[in-house]
Image: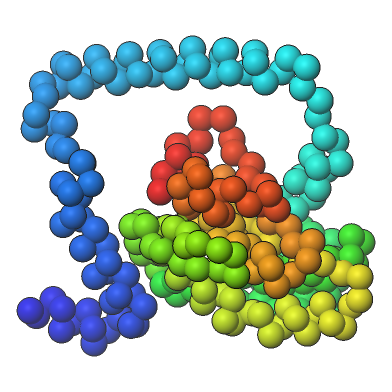
Amino acid sequence: GIIEMVTEKFLSSESVGAIKAIRKMITQLKEHGVVDIFRDYSTKDIVSSFLALFKLQQAAAYYGEQKRTEGHSVNKKLLQRLAYYSVFANAAYGWKMEAASNGKLDRGNLRTLVRKTGIKEEDVVAAKWASKTHRPAYFIVRDLKHRKIVLSIRGTFSARDVLTDLCASAETFETGRRGKHRAHHGMLEAAISLATETKETVEKELHANPGYSLVLVGHSLGGGVAAVLGTLWEKDYPNLQVYGYGSPCVSPADARPTTCKNIISVLGEGDPFACLS
């Protein structure tokens, strides 16, 4: 139809493909057991159910916290690393996020990156601040202090990022390990795009800096993409580590990347986006 002609003329092939994938997913909602509760139940019953669910969640959170704290020791070194690399994940949003959240105007993404992370400008290897559908913004730096090459992936910050988020159907993919895995379609496509775009640079940096290892970080969408990319690169890079902050669910609980031991996800209590996929 006319709408299809217009979108194909003015949007990139990635955006057109994402829109088609989202449309297909919506038409198949009934096949996945999704029902219209507002059609099938009264408003009173729906509100009462939500209130009951809220109380159950509060009780579960309380008793879960009690159980977690009994005899549990804190890994201080891990907490320090998570705090350290959270700054890198935040820096991927650039000066606009800094201005919106703190009112600071650094007038430039590179300047914001250098100031926030403490990385010298000459150690910023690559940076792409504008995203496309299935192609998130990112930067690559040398972390001389910890002997790491860091690839930081930005979270949702544009309409094109939203299209990547909304391609939420499960997609099958393979790695060097046996069997097939499943992941969020949009984030899998984004991880594959990033792998193609950055792998040569990453390998060049690791070769030029013996003893260095690779760290992938990201917040929200960026954390999800980092988890999938870490799964794709798991066998390629020894000691690869992934730190995701506020990452959404990107795969089933019993499949990779969820079961990967080199991927650590940090979630804020009550964060609704960490439960979405």
Q: Is residue 36 visible?
A: yes
Res 268 → quadrant: top right
- Quarter placement of the N terminus: bottom left
Q: Residue at x 20, y 41 (%)?
A: 33
Counting labels gives 0
Q: Is residue 104 visible?
A: no
**Residue 161: x, y in percent?**
43, 64
Q: Is residue 17 left or right of residue 103?
A: left
**Residue 185: x, y in percent?**
39, 63
Res 110 → quadrant: bottom right
Q: Is residue 6 above or below residue 219?
A: below
Nearer to the camera, 104 or 255: 255
Q: Is residue 47 left or right of residue 156?
A: left
Nearer to the camera, 64 or 92: 64
Q: Is residue 9 above or below residue 202?
A: below
Q: Residue at x 73, y 57 (%)?
A: 241
**Residue 210: x, y in percent?**
91, 76
Q: Residue at x 48, y 59 (%)?
A: 181
Q: Residue at x 16, y 57 (%)?
A: 27
Q: Is residue 148 left or right of residue 176?
A: right
Nearer to the camera, 29 or 266: 29
The image's colouring method is rainbow
Q: Is residue 8 left or right of residue 186?
A: left
Q: Is residue 215 above or below residue 68?
A: below
**Residue 39: x, y in percent?**
8, 32
